[in-house]
Amino acid sequence: MRKLVLAAVAASAAFVATPSLAQDATATDTSAPVDTSTAQAPDGTKAFGFEPYVAVRGGWEEFQTDSVAGAPQQNKLNGSLVEGLVGANVPLGAFFVGAEGNVAKGISGDIDWQYGAAGRFGLRAGESGLIYGKVGYQWVNFDKRVNTDRDFHDVTYGIGFEVGPKEIGLGGLTGNSGIRLRGEVSTFGWTNSFRPTLGIVAHF
């Protein structure tokens, strides 16, 4: 009787081990191509992809240091604006990189037009959230109180976030296209201005 029990246990162990060995063999087969379409970030979302987007936002900018690329401080240049952006994100696991271009029109105050481009990089927060930093270059044209025939220009820096929970139908980042809320604070030059903005991003 004991021999029959031992034989049964041995047969069961062999049966369980067989698929495990097959899986190990498959896992160690480096010749098989890697399917990045099913790779996942630590939070379970897709790890890689390409996501273009457009955005519209509004904000305010106040120039507040000794000079703004040659514009004197005593002018205290400022104004509200509306801005359009076009860009793309590339998710890289728990991180992402991207680039975008922007054009803004002054609504009130001293700003006439702005335009520029920037790179973005940061962390992904689930399928539809981002926390990012950005660095780029910006041109500003004023319509009063300074030389209106030239564009003032400098490096721009910024930090921001995007949020749009996929659970309520607002997808993005390698998922379905969706809408997200975007908030950002940026500066012209090294803290030569303070520029908070808030807007809507539509991802494809």
Image: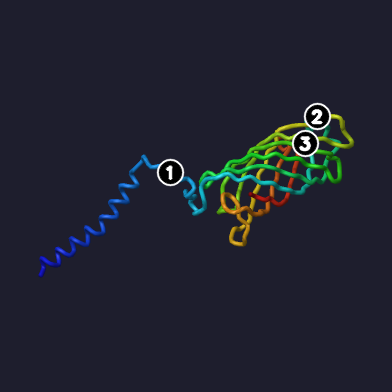
- Foreground mark, 3 or 1, reads 1
Above or below, 125 against 65 in this view is: below
Q: Secondary structure at mark 1?
A: loop
Residue type at mark 1 is Val
- Of 40 and 79, which appears nearest the observer? 40
Label 2, residues with CA under 10 Å away: few <14, some 14-19, many ≥20: few
Q: x, y (%) of residue 204?
A: 63, 49
Residue 44 picture location, percent across and down = 49, 54
Q: How many marks?
A: 3
Q: Residue at x 61, y 41 (%)?
A: 98
The residue at which mark 2 appears reads as: 70
Asked if labels 2 and 1 touch by Cβ distance under 8 angstroms, the answer is no
Q: Secondary structure at mark 2?
A: loop
Image check: 199 left or right of 52? Answer: right
Mark 2 to mark 3 CA distance (whole Å): 11 Å
Q: CA distance from mark 1 to mark 2?
A: 54 Å
Residue on which disc 3 sits? 65
Q: Residues within 10 Å of mark 1 (few under 14, many from 20)?
A: few
Question: Which residue is under mark 1?
Answer: 34
Q: Secondary structure at mark 3?
A: loop
